[in-house]
Amino acid sequence: MIVRIMGEGQLDVAQAHLAVLNRYDDELQVAIESGDDAAFRAALTALLSKVREVGTAVPAEKIVASDLMLPATDAHVDEVRKMLGADGLVPGSSSPA
């Protein structure tokens, strides 16, 4: 799966990592719903850090369609809220958006 972190680039993330990314995504949704900015910031940072950890950078010169778009590290909670789908940011997430 090709994941784009806005403002950074793309990473190739194996489907095997989807379950753990969904857990981070669930935590992010809970933080957004709670209105706790510190929890939101920590959850977003954790999700993006995990994607960077498990993903392999796609060379900038390689043109590939992204399967998933994630917000930048400094994204505002309202911006991220608008990006949420029924499954959150990561497909298969179990928390309601």
Image (tube, rainbow, N blue to C red):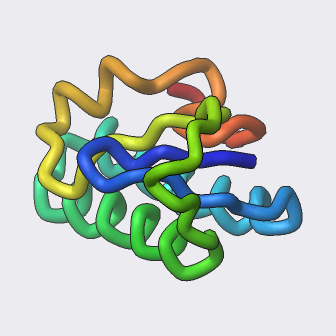
Depth order, front residue of 65/86: 65
Left or right side of 64 for 50: left
Depth order, front residue of 66/63: 63
Quadrant in the picture for residue 92: top right
Residue at (69% x, 41% y) in the render = 93
Q: Position of residue 26 (x, y in %)?
A: 55, 50
Left or right side of 15 for 24: left
Residue at (39% x, 24% y) in the render = 83
Q: Position of residue 72 (x, y in %)?
A: 25, 48
80 lies above or below 27: above
Q: Position of residue 86 (x, y in %)?
A: 61, 20
Left or right side of 68 for 92: right
Q: Position of residue 69 (x, y in %)?
A: 48, 36
91 lies above or below 81: below
Residue at (32% x, 18% y) in the render = 82
Residue extending farthest bottom? 53
Depth order, front residue of 64/33: 64
Quadrant in the picture for residue 78: top left
